[in-house]
Amino acid sequence: MNRLPLATCYLLFALCLSACFEPKEGCLDIAAINFDAGADKDCCCEYPKLVLTVDQVYDTLLFRNDSLYLNSSGQIFRIKSVAFYLSDFQLFQNGEVFTVSDTLTLNTFSGSDTSSQRFTNDFQLVRRTPVDYVIGTFRQDGNFEALNFRLGLSGEAQKVIPSKAPANHPLSNQPDILWRDQSAGFVFLQAVVVRDSMGATQPDTLRFLQSDLGQPRIGATGFFVHPTGYNFPLVLHVDFKKMFEGINWSMHDILAWKTRIVANLDSTFSVSQ
């Protein structure tokens, strides 16, 4: 019986292994959140997101829709709901500005006609839920010294046609009517309140348009770290006790209430990590 030389056997075995080998697909970019050091063929990379956790409270209490609260003057009132827009997120690293990379083309009003415009797609409509908001893809890692974002929308975003925006997009038609009309645009901040604890008292809806707020920005300086290959988490603290501080609920004066809320906005919001 003839036997093959040992070297030939090794060669045939190696050829067999080579023929059976299938390269493992995976992400080979260390900056991606699904980096796979054991992959042989690069594909399917998923990159970090800027994620904003919105912590809504009334002083030390967890804020809940349609709940009674006691203000500093001993007046009991009800906050039925609060909703507001955020957009135009900017993070600063050594003086350089970084934003999310996601974009979206939206239909806009252009006088009596319509047109299309490309936007950075970091629009967020904040309600009581969800708690975490994915702002968008953010690949720049390292340490950041400051951030800011807009309470409301830019002048160009105000022209977006809600009925033509993608379903469930923050700028699409909303059940709580946060778009008024072509001239007024979107409601930047809306609060539905009841000025006492009586069940028969009708709620008041306080709507803040661009004409009420201008273009306010929420900002913070500090030390914000985005580790390579991970999502970038930030926390927005919203204290509704501070938002409604100083309001006299015994006087049914909506204009005075709104003026007080606008004055309180700087102390209402803070950012941490």
Image (cartoon, rainbow, N blue to C red):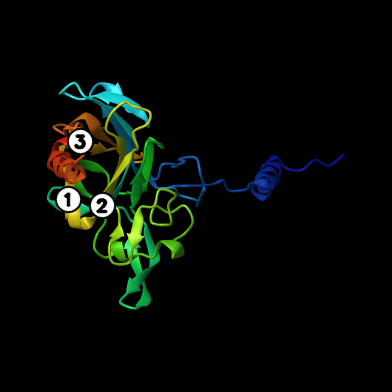
Q: Are marks 2 and 1 in contact (CB under 8 Å)?
A: yes
**Identity of the amino acid at label 2?**
Gly
Residue at image point 17% right, 49% down = 217
Give residue 72's position: percent from left, percent from top. Answer: 16, 23
Say which quarter of the image contains residue 250: top left
Q: Earlier in the sequence, mark 2 or mark 1?
A: 2
Give residue 67's position: percent from left, percent from top. Answer: 35, 27
> Which residue is under mark 2?
152
> Which residue is under mark 3?
243
Relative to 108, residue 190 above or below? above
In the rendered image, the quadrant that contains the N terminus is top right
Give residue 220's position: percent from left, percent from top. Answer: 15, 40
Q: Which mark is residue 112?
A: none
Distance from Cα at disc 3 to Cα at disc 2:
16 Å
Q: Earlier in the sequence, mark 1 or mark 3?
A: 1
Q: Nearer the viewer, residue 71 or 221?
A: 71
> Which residue is under mark 1?
216
Relative to 217, residue 111 above or below? below
Q: Nearer the viewer, residue 271 or 155?
A: 155
Q: Nearer the viewer, residue 202 or 56?
A: 202
Q: Secondary structure at mark 1?
A: loop
Q: Are marks 3 and 2 in contact (CB under 8 Å)?
A: no
Distance from Cα at disc 2 to Cα at disc 1:
8 Å
Q: Are marks 1 and 3 in contact (CB under 8 Å)?
A: no
Q: Earlier in the sequence, mark 3 or mark 2?
A: 2
Q: Residues within 10 Å of mark 3 (few under 14, many from 20)?
A: many
Q: Secondary structure at mark 3?
A: helix
Q: Is residue 183 visible?
A: yes
Q: Residues within 10 Å of mark 1 (few under 14, many from 20)?
A: some
